Image (tube, rainbow, N blue to C red):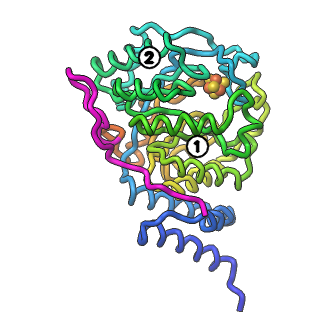
């Protein structure tokens, strides 16, 4: 007798549960495809599985990070989602690298907001020497004055630049792939997806942790979203930021229709199931896309948040996010894993990260 649709769905959820929680093995592409094909009325089951996996691999903590947009706008690249590209009329603020005092003030505010990681972001294709020196100076001062872990997002790097950042104690380097290999050429023509992969690899080779994610809702199909999750997993990131496209007026994606909250939750859950050990950080767009369901993002596998504002859009107050975490009974992590670097008078010394990504391969 043919199986009922319900029992087929149950079996695919049970298989994934057993693979990840009993066998502790990564899911195959075919297994993830089955989960993605579950009907909408099984979304709560998918979310519940992702939450169990998150708790089993990562625990209940949620890691908080703040960003500073330390150099805004006038970027020569043409990323279609980005209001900081000089090619689009977006009205975004344009300013050169901030004074050190402003960076330090933002770092102090980050610490006061209960975040443990501070990410210095600049809108460039890649850093030229003068900018890199100013960033290195800022990293040293932020370490010394606040003790925060410092991450950087400076675009495409050379090997030498990656090594200088790592030597300065930059713990984590953010370089998003943004979307899957197949979709990328329709999003950006001034550099390639492989350029981005090369920088992601250089960051790891230099000894930094890799923070690498992207933006969902840029017109990709569900299948391409899953491609993207597996492509990210191949790189072995420590952290995967998930942005949900909040279309910026004036950009080529300014009229893109929004992901539904259910599509977003499904994607967050699938990313967790493909990458059980990484920090999955809910980033830009969570307020607009998830709306009333923001808490569900943290019950669907996400375990990190950006607090405060994003690069060009306003986020929620840190108080609102702390209240949300209290309500969910999720403690704030005391740092992004144990420090990868000890910084003292003798400089920065590497030590092993607490959590390593397991290498995963799509079938
Ligand atoms: S995403 Fe980065 S590289 Fe692309 S236009 Fe924006 S700032 Fe430039």
Label 1: which residue? 292
How far across and how far down the image is residue 307, in percent? 46, 31
Are dots 2 and 1 in contact, CB under 8 Å?
no
In the rendered image, the quadrant that contains the N terminus is bottom right
Left or right: where 192 falls relative to 99:
right
How far across and how far down the image is residue 350, in percent? 29, 35
Q: Is residue 354 magenta?
A: yes
Looking at the image, can residue 251 be seen?
Answer: yes
> Where ligand 1 lies, by image quadrant?
top right
Asked if residue 322 is positioned above or below residue 125 in the image, the reply reads below
Residue at the image position 39 percent from the left and 37 percent from the top: 207
Classify mark 1: residues with Cα within 10 Å, few (<14), some (14-19) or many (20+).
few
How far across and how far down the image is residue 172, in percent? 42, 34
| Label 2 or label 1, whichever comes before in sequence order | 2
Seen from the viewer's position, the closer of residues 319 and 31 is 31
- Give the quarter of the image for residue 54: bottom left
Label 2: which residue? 135
Which residue is the extreme one toward the front? 160
Q: CA distance from mark 2 to mark 1?
A: 38 Å
Which is in the foreground here, disc 2 or disc 1?
2
Left or right: where 120 falls relative to 329:
right
Q: Secondary structure at mark 2?
A: helix
Q: Secondary structure at mark 1?
A: helix
- Give the quarter of the image for residue 192: top right
Magenta-drawn stretch, dominant element (helix, strand or loop):
loop
Residue at the image position 39 percent from the left and 8 percent from the top: 101
Residue at the image position 54 percent from the left and 43 percent from the top: 294
Magenta region, residue range: 337-363
Query: Which label was assigned to residue 93?
Result: none
Q: Is residue 229 magenta?
A: no
The response on whether ligand 1 sits within 8 Å of label 1 is: no
């Amino acid at each position: 007798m043919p199986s009922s649709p319900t029992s087929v769905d149950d079996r695919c959820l049970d298989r994934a549960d057993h693979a990840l929680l009993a066998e502790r093995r990564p899911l195959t592409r075919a297994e993830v495809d089955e989960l993605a094909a579950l009907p909408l009325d099984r979304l709560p089951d998918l979310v519940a599985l992702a939450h169990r996996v998150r708790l089993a691999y990562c625990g209940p903590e949620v890691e908080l990070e703040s960003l500073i947009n330390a150099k805004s706008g006038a970027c020569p690249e043409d990323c279609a989602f980005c209001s900081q590209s000089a090619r689009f009329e977006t009205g975004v603020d344009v300013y050169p690298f901030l004074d050190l005092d402003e960076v330090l003030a933002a770092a102090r505010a980050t610490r006061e907001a209960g975040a443990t990681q501070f990410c210095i972001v600049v809108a460039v294709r890649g850093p030229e020497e003068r900018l890199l020196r100013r960033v290195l100076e800022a990293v040293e001062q932020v370490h010394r004055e606040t003790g925060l872990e410092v991450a950087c997002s400076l675009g495409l790097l050379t090997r030498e630049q990656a090594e200088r950042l790592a030597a300065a104690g930059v713990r984590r380097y953010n370089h998003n792939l943004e979307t899957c290999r197949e979709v990328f050429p329709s999003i950006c023509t001034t550099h390639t997806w492989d350029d981005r992969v090369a920088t992601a690899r250089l960051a790891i080779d230099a000894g930094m942790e890799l923070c690498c994610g992207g933006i969902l809702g840029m017109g990709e199909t569900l299948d391409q979203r899953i491609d993207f999750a597996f492509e990210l997993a191949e790189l072995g990131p420590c952290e995967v930021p998930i942005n949900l496209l909040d279309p910026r007026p004036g950009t080529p994606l300014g009229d893109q229709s929004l992901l539904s909250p259910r599509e977003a939750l499904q994607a967050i859950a699938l990313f967790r199931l493909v990458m059980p050990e990484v920090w999955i950080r809910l980033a830009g767009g969570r307020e607009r896309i998830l709306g009333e369901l923001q808490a569900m993002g943290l019950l669907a596998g996400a375990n990190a948040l950006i607090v405060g504002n994003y690069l060009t859009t306003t986020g929620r107050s840190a108080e609102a996010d702390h209240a949300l975490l209290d309500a969910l009974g999720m403690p704030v992590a005391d740092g992004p894993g144990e420090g990868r670097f000890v910084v003292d008078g003798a400089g920065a010394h590497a030590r092993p990260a607490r959590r390593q990504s397991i290498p995963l391969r799509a079938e």
